Image: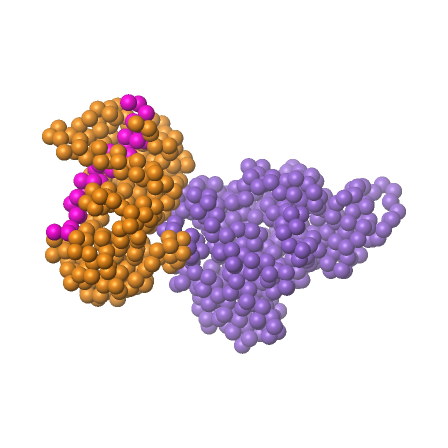
Amino acid sequence: MQALRRKDILGLEEMSAEEITFILETARSMQEIIQRSIKKVPTLRGRPVLNLFYEPSTRTKASFELAQKYMSADSVSVAGTSSSLVKGETLKDTVRNVEVMGVECVIMRHPVSGSSHYLARNVEASVINAGDGMHEHPTQGLLDMLTIWEKKGRLEELKVVIVGDVRHSRVARSNIWGLKKMGAEVVLAGPPTLMPPDLGAFDVKAFTCIEEAVEKADVIMALRLQKERQESGLFPSLREYAELYGLTLKRVAPAKEDVLIMHPGPINRGIEISSELADGPGSVVLDQVTAGVAVRMALLYLLLGGTKE
Amino acid sequence: MQSLIIKGGRVIDPSQNLDDLADLLVSEGTIEALKKGLKQPEGAAVIEAEGMVIVPGLIDMHVHLRDPGQEYKEDIFSGSLAAAAGGFTAVTAMANTDPVGDDPSVIRYVRERAGQAAVRVYPVGAVTKELKGEEMAEMGRIKKAGAVAFSDDGRPLVNGTLMRNALQYSSGLDALLIVHEEDPSLAAGGVMHEGAVSSVLGLNGIPAEAEEAMITRDLLLLKLTGGRLHVAHLSTAGSVELIRKAREEGLAVTAEVTPHHLLLTDRIVKNSGYSTDTKVKPPLRSENDRQALWEGLFDGTIDAVATDHAPHHPDDKDREFDFAPFGIAGLEAALPLLLNEVSSGRSKKLTLSLLVEKLSTAPARILGVPGGTLRKGSPADITIIDPSKIFTVNPETWHSKSRNTPFGGRRLTGAPVYTIVGGKIVMKEGVVVGDELEK
């Protein structure tokens, strides 16, 4: 199998449909390993990998760590806090340490947009962006696409509606780029204050009426609503948000009958999405989680191990 | 002092409406004669300037020298060497130092240090104490100590009443107020221009309206109070239009633009992969804004070009985008960048004469400082330009302590070859004289 012809995975904006397809196909073969009773292959034995998480993360961090274990990579996880970034060791010094430790791949989550570009520019190791500020979260975008692909059998010509705080969402940005490249139609919905200030470059439509946006939708993706957004004055209250924009069975009724309901987690139940919907028959929230491990295994394999077999 | 004759160059002096071949004689630090076929006095030093352009010394009216307080970023001496290297014979020194230039003692300190500098350094005093925007600084005493203008630059004057009072009070001193126009609540958290690019990059934006709202307020206050207002670093099409209308109404307002706002747009933040050298206030705007700034420069709405030289130590800039400070260092790249625009013939309206007007004549007039002219009897502050010299922007060779430029590596046509201050050559062929001076 060929390797990916890039050193880093920083975002889906710069990726081609061919690359995305290749990654998703590789991830599907990884799904088989995850189904086994002994989930371990020796592919990345002795390959040092570093997980650098400057923001709290449960799902993404666990998913990367499991992927590394299944692939037999030698990995270390370092958790920092946002405040240590400002006061403590600079990313530059961290970078220098990474270099001398001989790490081959760094997975980083960081609260500042563009920080994975900074890291990638300064280290020889491959960098996988596990979420940089509001910019991109490419592995989430890929796992979402894998989930949709496995359920629907295709991505092209599907209508995918992303609902909620798109403005601050790296998940939304990665999904917009990825899905559009793969031929899906992407529609955004939510209060105008939570939309990016200028959608020109994305070439997508935004709606303020959820019912209108989800009409004949194949997929509805809810985004997590951060409480800080209300505090910064972008909408008046959580209860008003839930009442006007929260996803409920009734509100998504105009979508197709077999619509998939997705959420990157963690869920604020009763705010951006109701429990009946999040736990309902159309929900693929847990499939997203297993797809996440497969996608991350695929990326590690393609960046580190692809040529060695 | 040995006299100096500059022979055979093309002399461009907008203050005399002059663009012709002529010789220039300098003695005792002043301009002695300017005409064709001057007789060479015995013992005079000679600069053969055939093919060169002789212009009144350039004045950068917006410079941060960081001294006192942040000498690791720049100091008055290093900044003056950078100015000399860049073809500037005079610079201002903004008041956002530590301590702030809100007291006559700090102004006197700057003037004293300026005595050892390679170029003329004109201190700008603070409008408010500690730049807090709360209480007026002692503008009268600060002016007496030698401040040429007043500014809290780096910070906007948020309080409307304070701005009103400052304008009104400064009018009694015939003092110039230089303002950094930005509504801080609209700009809060922003690190680049708000638009399509910031939306893609996931960076918080600073809308054009943050600047325009503040300019609107201050133009209304200017009308109310009188006084002299100079708007620093215009960055948006709307700002240009506001100034244009105010000028038509006869308000005493002037404005400047930086080379980076004339030459770059927000796209470079993306194309450079979030390079912090593109992070500056006001932010690099859209192509439409950039075009409007050129138009404003051509039609006279924008009086001057100033660099807003904002030096930072490489460690300060070598960080994540949100954490890096704002600012671009401009002194050593500005003139070649602008000359390159002339030589590339981008616009018929952009002539060398216009450039000299914006970089020398106008700043001298606005600030009320000597220079900006080659008239007989004026101080011999002269910049000699080789319009066909190939120049590459290389921050590693800068005299400034900073390296923060988004123009590194650019190959340009046109550069200064001599900088002469008070008849003394302080830069020759890129070599700055003064390295031997004590730092």
Q: Foreground residue, B230 or A52?
A: A52
Q: Residue at x 33, y 29 (%)?
A: A3
Q: Position of residue B293 (x, y in %)?
A: 56, 59
Q: Colour of chain A?
A: orange
- Report the number of numbered marks: 0
Task: Tell me if residue A116 can be seen.
Answer: no
Looking at the image, is B359 positioned above or below residue A17?
below
Where residue A53 appears, as percent x and y from the top left, is 27, 40
Q: Give me the chain that's purple.
A: B
B360 or A289: nearer the viewer: A289
In front of the other: A81 or B335:
B335
Residue drawn at x 49%, y 56% is B286
Residue lying at the far bottom in this picture: please name it: B224
* Image quadrant in which the N terminus of chain A is located: top left
Q: Nearer the viewer, residue A26 or B257?
A: A26
Q: Which residues are magenta?
A: A281-309
Inspect the magenta stretch and tell me whether residue A296 lies in it: yes
* Whether residue B182 is situated above or below residue A223 in the rendered picture: below
Location of residue B354 with respect to B328 vertically, above or below: below
Seen at 32% across and 25% down, the residue is A307
Where residue B256 sits, quadrant-wise, is bottom right
- Is residue A223 located in the magenta-colored stretch of the structure? no
